Image: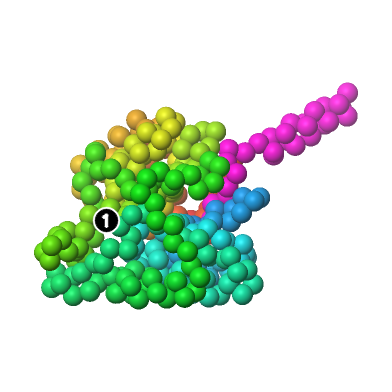
Amino acid sequence: MIQNFWKYILIIFLFSSNLKSTEYEITILATNIANFGGIGEWSFSALLESEEESILFDTGFDENTVLHNANLLKKDLSKVEKVILSHFHGDHTGGLIKLRKTYMNSNPKSFSDVYVAEGFFDQRFDEHGALRGFIGGFNKVSDFKEKADNLGINFIVIDETYELAPNLVLSGPVERIFERVVVSPGFYLKENGVLVDDLLKDDQSLGIKTDKGWYMMSGCGHAGMMNTAHKFQQIENKDIYGAIGGFHLFRSTEVEISKTAKSLKKFGLKQLVGGHCTGIHAARTIADIASISKDNLSHGAIGTVVTKDLKIFRSSVE
């Protein structure tokens, strides 16, 4: 009878260990907070790994950050062939050229397909009309594009929802409905020779379909966290179970944070890994209002992992 009991326990363990909510494990490779030996900076990057492929979402700011942190965490980036850039800002695009150079000899396809939203290559200017591209560390957008082209990088520009892989969906440009656009001061576009505010129309996010609902990944969430959540629910009417990345709430007012939190609670948010520009206070306020448990709240650090069964594995610094 005892033998049958332990056989039953073993069967349950083996069955439960094979259960998973998503095909992808997520590891943060660049954000503000670093664990021992890691490089922290004002940026974001996350690695998605499945049995079939590895995908990189954003590439950090300094060209060496993602490389260093990946080596520290023993992550093999040579397998990465698809890259998602959430928007043009240098703290999300700065590592692309170096990453391509580093791995292209060992894998000619590494870092070769880069997905960006429409408007990504628009030339930006400062308030005086001088070039201020900031894209991948280049002020002149055409210089960045030429450098990437010479390295064999293929940019896929999307202007609508795009299925990147089974259960992985790029939002494309996000319609601004519920909240104002979170712009970055000092960036302008030119329309008919006149400087106008850059509304970051190229901001896009990634939606991961899980058996618990959408898991939303943003670099900065300039399009707005509520707008982005709404976009994914329009694609498929599922709860927004989780969100990871930067959501640009660190300068938001209490009223704005509270409004966002109440909306996210209605969207079904149960887990938040708020790194980069989210802000610790904003993340905690959202968790309080949306009734997110401590186990499901993280401020994100180098090495923070969201497992395939949607558990948060915290790096040492957390």
- Kindly tell me whether residue 259 is visible in this rendering: yes
Where is residue 85, by image quadrant? bottom left
> Magenta region: which residues?
1-28
Mark 1 belongs to which amino acid? Leu
Where is residue 235, by image quadrant? top left
Q: Residue at x 52, y 58 (%)?
A: 82
* Residue 258 place in picture, x, y as percent: 26, 39
Q: In this view, does 156 lie above or below 12?
A: below
Residue in front for this viewpoint, 153 or 205: 153
Q: Residue at x 44, y 61 (%)?
A: 155
* Residue 69 place in picture, x, y as percent: 53, 68
| Magenta stretch: includes residue 149 | no
Q: In this view, does 18 lie above or below 142?
A: above
Residue in front for this viewpoint, 298 or 132: 132
Which residue is outermost to the top? 1
Q: Mark 1 points at which residue?
A: 200
